[in-house]
Image (spheres, helix red, strand yellow):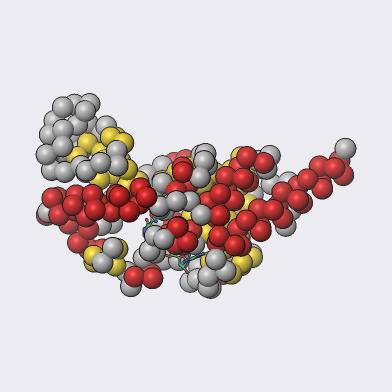
Amino acid sequence: MKKDYQHIVILTGAGISAESGLATFRAANGLWNNHPVEDVATIEAFQRNPAYVHDFYNELKPLLNAAKPNPAHLAITKLQQEYPAKISIITQNVDTLHEKAGSQNIYHIHGQINQAVCLNCGHVLETFTDVDTETTCPHCQISGMMKPNIVFFGENLLYMEDVDKLLHQCDLFISVGTSGVVFPAASFVQIAKYYGAETYEFNLELTSNNLYFDHHIYGKAGETLPRFVSELLNAQASADNHNH
Ligand code: NAD
């Protein structure tokens, strides 16, 4: 572990929210809230039956709204507040637990549950209340064109230009609770490593992506990440004392 990272990127996946009571994909055999992904998370499904897809996300909203950040989310906030580096979070999660934990610089590349986007004008509506096939866009006033701001399979990821820059700049890349099977997020570690970052993986188990990580830290992120953050802060503080 170095003591003076300048740019840290933290990629998070469903595993970081598991200890907040939100099921991961894999734990549920690829089902999301008991629904096959093809029925609720593809652009074709939305085009075929938008009412059904809206219902699914409307049902999910109270569950995700009620969830509370766990020690892993809070550890990231602590790192952002106390470590003197640019620290960005790229999350695949559609929950808002990083925001609830008080973190900054969050890129929701797969969208977020509390947003809907107007397919007519592009306006993003932020709400935890229901959105359906009749909702009127508050910007262009057209009804029936709102889509959950969730990136479905078959759609482009959000914030990819920013992500690209962050991966090029970063000297420490940390992945937390992601299985490394959903692309392109699974390739971020390779890109960061190629540009010289040191890479850490936090997971319960070895993932299919494990070859690209310099370090593996196994265990529940709510336990391993706070410990790691303390170590980073201590190493930095002792380097700071040494320099004065
Ligand atoms: P995934 O479900 O494929 O993998 C989760 C990973 O987290 C697994 O490798 C598992 O071993 C690990 N894990 C589980 N509990 C952990 C813990 N306590 N500590 C550390 N690691 C733990 O998730 P993914 O890679 O993020 O991909 C799934 C997709 O599903 C994403 O695109 C995401 O958008 C979506 N999703 C989001 C949520 C959410 O927003 N909370 C929940 C389910 C799925």
Q: Is residue 212 left or right of residue 56?
A: right
Quadrant of the displayed image that contains ligand 1: bottom left
Q: Is residue 29 visible?
A: yes
Residue at left offset 78%, top offset 45%: 237
- Image vertical order of residue 123 relative to residue 235, above or below: above
Residue at left offset 56%, top offset 49%: 74
Residue at left offset 19%, top offset 61%: 39
Quadrant housing residue 44? bottom left
Percent x, y for residue 29?
33, 73
Percent x, y for residue 185?
44, 56
Quadrant housing residue 139? top left
Q: Nearer the viewer, residue 39 or 55?
A: 55
Percent x, y for residue 2?
74, 53
Q: Quadrant of the N terminus?
A: bottom right
Q: Nearer the viewer, residue 160 or 231?
A: 231
Residue at left offset 41%, top offset 56%: 184
Q: Quadrant of the C terminus?
A: top right
Q: Is residue 168 visible?
A: no
Q: Is residue 108 left or right of residue 114?
A: right
Quadrant housing residue 213? bottom right
Percent x, y for residue 175?
54, 58
Q: Is residue 54 left or right of residue 222?
A: left
Q: Nearer the viewer, residue 183 or 81?
A: 81
Numbered circles on residues, count: 0
- Image vertical order of residue 103 relative to residue 95, above or below: above
